[in-house]
Image (cartoon, rainbow, N blue to C red):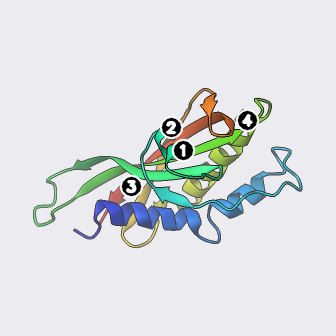
């Protein structure tokens, strides 16, 4: 077994936090979303799966919040002498919050498109024995109360093959 589950998630987080990762994608896309001149906050991808209500009670948060976690593992016995020959479903969840409804969905979609860009640029061999499949699934939730008055989140799920 080359990767533990935590090791694979941390390797994926490294792709998001790299110099050409999520920050570069947001900078490249912000003009298309009318965010010219707006300061895009530095974000850190956290290895955590927690509901927003619980995460907000744990301390002060700066939005957007990005969570990365393994949602599912599939192992096959196709390779006999390996402990784990399969794939894992990696989920990246992004949450945005603001005090007004206007523009919250557009702001969320900016981050979703930036995450999609990172996935598309890193599909295939992602280094260190990780292969990201080219397909992904995006789920966008409705706006609800929370965060800095209103909160909206989206999840981007992809499959990673582990060697």
Q: Are marks 3 and 1 in contact (CB under 8 Å)?
A: no
Q: Which mark is residue 160?
A: 3
Q: Earlier in the sequence, mark 3 or mark 1?
A: 1
Left or right of residue 53, residue 102 in this image: right
At a point 53% along the width and 65% down the height, the residue shown is 15
Residue that label 1 marks? 56
Q: Quadrant of the C terminus?
A: bottom left
Q: Judge from the rendering whether residue 154 lies leftward or rightward of residue 10; answer left or right.
A: right
In this view, which residue lies farthest toward the right?
37
Cα separation, mark 4 vs mark 2, equals 18 Å
Q: Which residue is mark 4?
A: 104
Nearer the observer, 142 or 139: 142
Q: Residue at x 62, y 64 (%)?
A: 21
Q: Which residue is mark 2?
A: 53
Label 2: state its secondary structure: helix
Badge 3 element: strand
């Amino acid at each position: 077994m080359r990767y533990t589950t935590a090791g694979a998630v941390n390797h994926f987080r490294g792709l998001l936090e790299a110099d050409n990762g999520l920050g570069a994608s947001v900078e490249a896309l912000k003009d298309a979303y009318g965010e010219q001149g707006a300061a895009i906050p530095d974000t850190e991808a956290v290895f955590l799966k927690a509901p927003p209500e619980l995460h907000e009670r744990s301390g002060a948060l700066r939005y957007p919040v990005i969570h990365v976690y393994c949602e599912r593992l599939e192992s096959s016995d196709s390779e006999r002498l390996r402990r784990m020959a399969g794939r894992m479903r990696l989920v990246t969840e992004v949450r945005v919050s603001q005090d007004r409804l206007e523009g919250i969905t557009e702001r969320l979609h900016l981050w979703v498109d930036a995450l999609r860009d990172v996935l598309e640029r890193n599909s295939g061999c992602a280094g260190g024995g990780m292969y990201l499949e080219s397909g992904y699934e995006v789920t966008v939730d409705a706006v609800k109360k929370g965060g800095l008055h209103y909160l909206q989140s989206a999840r981007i799920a992809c499959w990673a093959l582990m060697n």
